[in-house]
Image (cartoon, coloured by chain):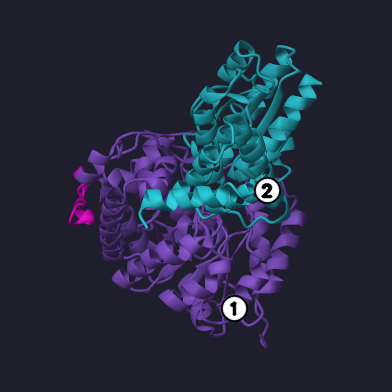
Chain colours: A cyan, B purple
Amino acid sequence: MNMSGCFIQLCRVIILMNNQELIDLYNQAVYDTDRDAALEVIHGALKAGKTPEEIVFEIIIPALDQTVKMIENDDSMCLAQHFMTSQIASEVVDEMLPLFKTETEHRGTVVIGSAFGDLHSLGKRIVAGCLRANMIEVFDLGVNVPAERFIDEAILHHAEVIAVSSMMMHTARGDRGALGIRKILEERSLSQIRLVVGGAPFRFNPELYKIVQADAWAPDGVSASRVIWELIKEVRG
Amino acid sequence: MNMTGLERLAAALTGQPADRVPVFCNLFDQGFKELRKKPQEYYANGELVAEAQLQMRQRFGYDNVWSLFYVGKEAELLGCKDILYASDGPPNVADFVLKSEADIHALQIPDRLEELPAFGETRKCLEILKREVGGTQPVCAYITATMALPALLMGMERWMELLFWGPKAARDELLEKCHQFFVREVQAYRAGGADLLVYSNPFGSVDTVPMRFFRNTALPWIERDIQAVGTAGVVYYCGMARFNPVLDLVIERTGIGVYYLSPLDDLRQGKALINGRGLTCGVINDIALIDWSPAETRAEVSRMMAVGKPGGKFLFGTGVMPLSIPEANIQAMLDAAYELGMYSADE
């Protein structure tokens, strides 16, 4: 059977599936790091009659939630699977959003970047992708971001959360990373903005986020989207 | 019994009696502080790196020396010109050699790395280390595995994209070239006298890739790497990622004799899995070490020795040893390791 034949066959199967079965099929492809198969499930669901809104709110966001729960109970999911989870979900949401019948408001705003002196970008990309897939607006400031810039951008975009990624110890606990951001937040009485951190050093010392005066941390990029969403809800009351 | 580091290592590898467990300590970033130099000046000079390594080993008394300057040095051998230095941490690659698919096609692997100007300072460092402590302390080198090297050349993010959904031909071409580099780099370090080659590969861990990918793609490349250079002096290390779940497979398929676990691996499980087929290296969580008290440090060393020491074939090691670890904590860790790592006559 050729590719289009396979796709038609998949659509025939998908039309008989409920949302949970679709989520399971989609997530299995993601966990297998099979991007093409995951996108086929989504496109098949669209072809079978799901609306773009249903794809995002009934498949993609619940699929992400399910992954977060799975990670909480079992830490065997790996970096490549986190990367796939994030990138495919954000790719689908980017594709679906222009097709929505009405414009949907973002559920919150986050500025994200790698700490000053840190040139690693994978971790924050995973977080940003998951946030976007969760309909949270993300301003990615890139790598090697000075503390002042995090603050300025957070104010400019009315962000509820500043998210800082650090892959190295000196950028995780140095004065120009999270600690520097906290200092400026205090100096400028910006206590309504929450500060969240992540990256390898925090996995090796789960208490480190307190030392760098962050409000929260997450052990991986996918879970970070849940932690950040909780902070957004807290700020928004 | 008063043994040298090399003798302790040899005893640990073969399960022969020794005075104590060998203790490896990785003090890289501390070098420029030791010599009161600026990072840029320090890392540009192999004599300074060797001097700092020798001086710190002399002062602390551990059982190895390193020829590694910083990890990004390998990218410099392939054309990277821009390194970001820090006064409080390791240098980093600031400009990637591979920015496009065309760069992959254009990438040339030099025939003899040891003749490159970029290898010159490393060669100088190796020569000094061999001259000063060769035959008494093992000289360690750090070699990035074929599958991990592209992350240094194009960034982990873009390497993940290419690896999982990029054009297969470009991915395979890059891996072939990285393998060629790996083999030549091992030859260069062996020619320079390195005793141990730390084979660093985050893709050798299921913390990085799923088990199916590991079996089908990562492991065959690991086998190819090891078949090409042999197992002599090779240390399996996944860049602080855990690898207990694949230990059995790696031992069976590669025959590597030394396993440098992650601090997050279950040491007891790791030693049981290795089961005498190689040397188990228990690695302390040196991120947590920054904030531990001397009593907490001693308790952790004691726990690790209690698990690793019985039956021998055990080495105590450190991970990345960030610069922010207070010297008193380094000393407390080493004192505890020397004392609690002593073998009694009946052990």
Between A232 and A28, the one nearer to me in the picture = A28
Three-letter code, disc 1 = Asp
Mark carried by residue B19:
1
The quadrant in which residue B45 appears is: top left
Magenta segment, prevailing SS (helix, strand or loop):
loop
Point out residue B334 in the picture as x, y percentages from the top left corner: 63, 60
- Which residue is at a point 43% across and 34% down the rendered structure image? B85
Q: Quadrant of the C terminus of chain A?
A: top right
Q: Pick out the residue farthest to the right.
A: A237
Say left or right for B300 vs B109.
right
Kindly identify which chain the residue marked by label 1 belongs to. B
Is B278 included in the stretch rendered in magenta? Answer: no
Between A109 and A111, the one nearer to me in the picture = A109
What is the crowding at mark 2: few (fewer than 14 residues within 10 Å), some, or many (at least 20)? few
Circle 2 residue: A20
Task: Check the image and report above or below for A176 versus A42.
Answer: above
Between B238 and B163, the one nearer to me in the picture = B163
What is the crowding at mark 1: few (fewer than 14 residues within 10 Å), some, or many (at least 20)? some
Q: Nearer the viewer, mark 1 or mark 2?
A: 2
- Which residue is at a point 34% across and 53% down the rendered structure image? B125
Instruction: Report the number of numbered marks.
Output: 2
- Which residue is at a point 54% across and 58% down the rendered structure image? B25
Mark 1 and mark 2: Cα distance apart in space: 61 Å
Under circle 2, the secondary element is helix
The quadrant in which residue B301 appears is: bottom right
Point out residue A40 in the picture as x, y percentages from the top left corner: 48, 45
Tell me where the magenta segment starts and ends, as one range: B106-116
Q: Quadrant of the N terminus of chain A?
A: bottom left
